[in-house]
Amino acid sequence: MARYDRAITVFSPDGHLFQVEYALEAVRKGNAAVGVRGTDILVLGVEKKSTPKLQDSRSVRKIVSLDNHIALACAGLKADARVLVNRARIECQSHRLTVEDPVTVEYITRYIAGLQQKYTQSGGVRPFGLSTLIVGFDPYTGVPSLYQTDPSGTFSAWKANATGRNSNSMREFLEKNYKETSGQETVKLAIRALLEVVESGGKNVEVAVMTKEHGLRQLEEAEIDAIVAEIEAEKAAAEAAKKAPPKDT
């Protein structure tokens, strides 16, 4: 491994690009993020670190809007995310100006992934240390989409996915529990996945929902707390049902 991790453009003899792998490690140490696609709704949730008492928590957003119909959540380095988000927003507006049509979710995902890939192949730069979850509705068909990109520049479409800290356990939970849902059930599934790795309560979770009619909306802390309480009540009821003695027939 010696010396092969010093230059981004140099492969190691066994075919590794160490700087890209280190960027993926930065993502794994970042906040947990989850995205779930419903039939009529898209949900993004991220782990929220506790903010200092005097800090305005609204100034720290991990779920952002790229266009009226597209939003992004990320895990990894927030400063890198800001640069990538600004470039993506400019591309969205440039596309509207040039083509007179909004971008599709796949188009902007390809653009973001292309930027990330470009920074793995050029000298004098380093990879973006973040993975993104991009959601949106197709402006022509109205179909909801969820994509993920990572520091290497690869992207893929998902029904539900997680990235960041403990993403494997969240992904396993989603694989076991995912089914085509709509409305509040989709929101509940995303929050349940986050609660696998995050302490309970709306203070530690940031959730945004996107619908075709109303666009992106951040859920208030009280709304999240109400859903968390509902999830915990359901869990308690399921546990009680398991412990209850079988009824005599």
Image (spheres, helix red, strand yellow):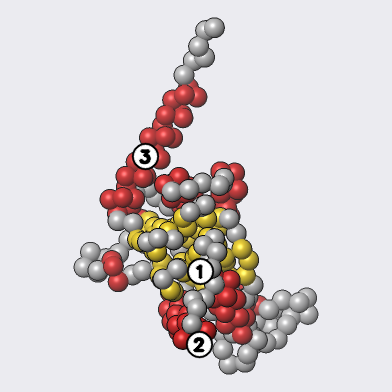
User: Residue 178, how many percent across, how many down?
Assistant: 56, 46
Q: Which mark is residue 139?
A: 1
The residue singled out by tag 3 in the image is 230
The numbered mark, 2 or 3, whose residue comes first in the sequence reads 2
Distance from Cα at disc 3 to Cα at disc 1: 34 Å
Which element type, helix, strand or loop, lies under badge 3?
A: helix
Q: Are marks 3 and 1 in contact (CB under 8 Å)?
A: no
Q: Residue at x 57, y 82 (%)?
A: 115
Q: Is residue 153 above or below residue 196?
A: below
14 to the left or right of 77? right
Identity, as a three-letter code, of the amino acid under mark 1: Pro
| The image quarter in which residue 13 lies | bottom right
Query: Which residue is most to the bottom?
Result: 124
Identity, as a three-letter code, of the amino acid under mark 2: Thr
Q: Crowding at label 3, few (<14), some or many (≥20) Cα neighbours within 10 Å? A: few
Identity, as a three-letter code, of the amino acid under mark 3: Glu
Q: Which mark is residue 98?
A: 2
